[in-house]
Amino acid sequence: MVQERTLPVFQAASAQITKEEGLRLYEDMILGRFFEDKCAEMYYRGKMFGFVHLYNGQEAVSTGVIQSMRPGEDYVCSTYRDHVHALSAGVPAREVMAELFGKATGCSKGRGGSMHLFSAEHNLLGGFAFIGEGIPIALGAAFQSKYRREVLGDETADQVAACFFGDGTTNNGQFFECLNMAALWKLPILFVVENNKWAIGMAHERATSQPEIYKKASVFGMPGVEVDGMDVMAVRAVAQEAVARARAGEGPTLIEALTYRFRGHSLADPDELRTKDEKEAWLARDPIKKFAACLIEQNLVNQEELKAIERKIQSTVDEGVEFALSSPEPDASELYRFVFAEDE
């Protein structure tokens, strides 16, 4: 079992949250979990093909960050583990599911599949199959936001970009280059490292000389924050502060969320490298169960209200599958469409 880091302690009772906010966060996390569970079912039934990387266990990171922004206005950039980021950003579940089925009604018109979700409408800049690819894209979005505001005088240009990537990516050149540029120009961007301890089959501690990734921010003169990525309230608090800094023109933040994927690297991964003890220890920290207990302890909701959300989301996911199954395949005559921006 790889050496565990001590998770930062967050006092959830001291956090201010309304019932409406709590239910919104819970619904977003449940949507992510139920959607991914259905993806696994469809994949093993032979309805979904290619590589499919699920997000189970990491929902607190997506929800905590993206729901602290302005979904549909701010920018989100993802990786190949992108389904839940897309859902949190507001892309309808039916469009994400259709894309996974390779259908013309998918958010990428059936061209992208699991690893290349995109939605201009929701400012989802894309999922990227190669690690580190999305970081310069998110940097560009942050740059244009600052340029429009400070050079072109557009007072409405206060959008923030959030770029998600894994622990393995932080040893790549794009990571260091883009942190440097973001710090120099004080760009409105959040660099969110989802440290789930494993870069495919390589343990994080074995692959880097400085496993505490958030400390790398100090080299660039930007804030670096370590957060319990299994606690949505903790992630939300850190993200809200980082978003406020970015929107105020104070520059970027590097957030390292300590989290864990409950499934293998992909659905084709037998997941034999991680020990049973390690997996069970992290399963006990399930972010959804933890947040549900928090809401009930604070007397914000009751069990039936949470169950009602779960029934609603299950219906949404099931409808998404039916939509995907009944949707048409992309027409061969449109093979070269949607390659360039002007070809809509």
Image: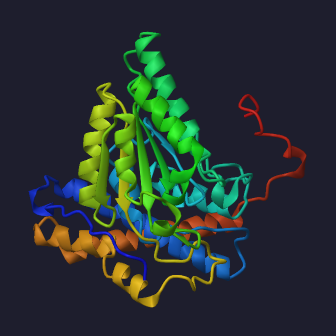
Tell me the quadrant of the picture where the N terminus can be found: bottom left
Q: Which of 283 and 313 is in front in this view?
A: 283
User: In the current view of this chain or complex, which residue is farthest to the front?
Assistant: 209
Above-or-below relation of 136 to 224: above
Left or right placement of residue 130 versus residue 328 in this view: left
Q: Where is residue 211 in the image (x, y as percent from the top left)?
A: 41, 60
Res 46 visible? yes
Label tally: 0
Left or right placement of residue 13 versus residue 91 in this view: left
Tell me the quadrant of the picture where the C terminus can be found: top right
Q: Residue at x 48, y 66 (%)?
A: 204
Res 121 visible? no
Left or right placement of residue 234 versus residue 76 in this view: left
Q: Which residue is drawn at 19% across and 64% down?
A: 9
Above-or-below relation of 132 to 13: above
Left or right placement of residue 241 versus residue 74 in this view: left
Q: Position of residue 198 (x, y in %)?
A: 51, 69
What colour scheme governs how the chains and residues are painted in the rendered image of this protein?
Answer: rainbow
Q: Position of residue 276 (x, y in %)?
A: 45, 89
Q: Which of 162 and 173 is in front in this view?
A: 173
Among the 4 quarters of the image, the one containing residue 222? top left
Q: Residue at x 32, y 29 (%)?
A: 247
Q: Nearer the viewer, residue 167 or 96?
A: 167
Above-or-below relation of 306 to 147: below
Q: Position of residue 127 (x, y in %)?
A: 60, 51
User: In the current view of this chain or complex, which residue is farthest to the bottom?
Assistant: 276
Q: Which of 77 and 195 is in front in this view?
A: 195
